[in-house]
Amino acid sequence: MKLGFVVNDIMTEQVGYTTTRLAMWAINRGHDVWIIGLGDLAYDPDESIRARARTVPKKKYKSTELYLKALQGKTAIKERITVDELDILMLRSDPANESGSRSWAAAAGINFGRIAMRHGVIVLNDPNGLAKAMNKTYFQLFPEEVRPQTLITRDVSEIKSFSKDRGENIILKPLQGSGGSGVFILRPEDRSNLNQIVESLSKDGYIIAQEYLKAAEEGDIRLFMMNGQPLRHKGKYAAFRRVRHGDDIRSNIHAGGKLAQAVITDEHLKLAEIVRPKIVQDGMFLVGLDIVGNKLMEINVFSPGGLGSAQMFEKVNFSHAVLDALERKVEYMNYYRRNFDNDEMATL
C-alpha cells in the first residue's frame, strides 16, 4: 500500500501525535509511507498532483521517537513524488493552527486533496466533507439533541440577552480555533466583564456563546469513530477521559488537563449512533467525539489525536485497527476498479 499523510509541517510533528504513530506502524507493516507538509504540494502542467515528500529507510522501528528522528533528520529520504500514484492520502493537518502569514495553508490540503481524489486516490477524510467543517458552525449541522444550546454572533447585546435568559454560567469562545484557546466562562456575577471578553474574542471573528454543561466539571471523553462506528479493537473502545486541572475550565491536555481511563456507556454509544449518518454522508473516516455528560462538545474531523492515550489505558494498539481498515479499502478499490462515493468509502 502506498500511503501519504498531509500534515501542517513535517518539522513540527511530535512523537506523541496520532499521525506519527500511524505512519510508524504502517512502515513496520511494510507499506510505503510518505509525509507531506502543506507547503510542499504542487499542481503540475500535466495536471498531476505532486509533492516534495519525506519517508524513512525501510526497517522495523521500535518507537515513535526513533521513527520521527529518522523522518526529521539526515537519514530521511526526500523525493518529489506523484501524489496521484498513492493508494491513500490522509489529510491530517489542522486549519486552526494556520493563521497570520500562513493563512494560505488552512485549506491547502483540502484543495489539493479534491484533485487527487478525482484522479482515483482514496482521500481521507473526504476533502469535500472537511471543507464544510472549516469552522465550528459545522457542529451546528448535527442533530439538536446532541448539542449544547448555542448562539453565534459578534453582537455584545445578543450575548448579554443569551446570558440573562439562561440565568446561569455560559461559555464564550472563538468560532475559529481549537485546543481550548480563548475559552472563557461567564458567570452571572461576572457580566460586567462581558464587554472586554467580547472585544478580545471578536478580533478573530465570530463568537460562540454556549450553555455551560455542569458535567464538564468532571472532564470530557474523547471517543474515536472509524467507518461510522465507535472504534473498537480486541473488545476495547478507543477512548480516554480528560479531567480539568484546578479551576481551569478547560480539560485539554496542553491547558493542564489530566488523562484518565474512560468508561464507555450506552449513553455514549447512543450519541455516536445519532451523529453517525452525517459523519458517513460527509465521508469522515476517522473522527474524535468530545463528550460531556449526555452532550457532544465538539467533533474533531481534521486531525483527531489521542490514539496513544487510548492505547495506554486499554493496552490495545488501535493503530492496527486503523491500518487494517485502510488496507481493506485499497483491496476493495483494486478489486472493483472504480471510485466509491463518500458514504461507501467511509464505511468500507
Image (cartoon, rainbow, N blue to C red):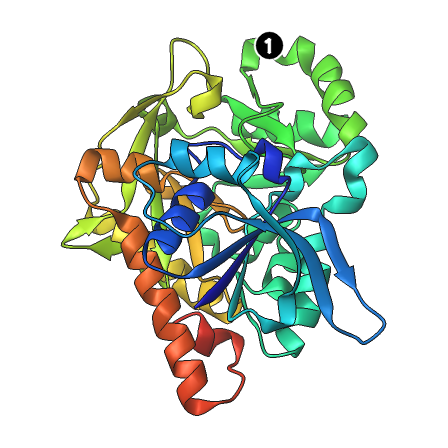
Query: Looking at this view, is 76 or 115 the one in front?
Result: 76
Q: Residue at x 72, y 50 (%)?
A: 40
Q: Residue at x 66, y 50 (%)?
A: 134
Whether residue 258 appears in this view of the structure is yes
Quarter of the image with the C terminus is bottom left
Q: Amino acid at mark 1?
A: Asp
Please provide percent x and percent y for residue 223: 33, 45
Q: Residue at x 80, y 31 (%)?
A: 100
Query: Looking at this view, is 210 or 13 the one in front?
Result: 13
Dividing the picture into quarters, in which one does residue 160 lie?
A: top right
Query: Looking at this view, is 288 or 38 the one in front?
Result: 38
Query: Looking at this view, is 93 or 223 the one in front?
Result: 93
Query: In the image, is 133 to the left or to the right of 29?
Result: right
Dividing the picture into quarters, in which one does residue 233 lie?
A: bottom left
Please provide percent x and percent y for residue 145: 42, 52
Residue 201 against residue 2 in the figure, above or below: above
Q: Dot 1, crowdedness within 10 Å: few (<14), some or many (≥20)? A: few
Residue 152 against residue 186 in the figure, above or below: below
Dividing the picture into quarters, in which one does residue 81 lie?
A: bottom right
Which residue position is annotated with label 1? Answer: 190
Quarter of the image with the N terminus is bottom left
Whether residue 293 appears in this view of the structure is no
Residue 110 against residue 94 in the figure, above or below: below
Q: Residue at x 75, y 34 (%)?
A: 99
Please provide percent x and percent y for residue 110: 67, 58
Farthest residue to the left: give it: 235
Q: The residue tagged with tag 1: helix, strand or loop?
A: helix
Q: How many marks?
A: 1
Query: In the image, is 317 to the left or to the right of 126?
Result: left
Please provide percent x and percent y for residue 227: 37, 65
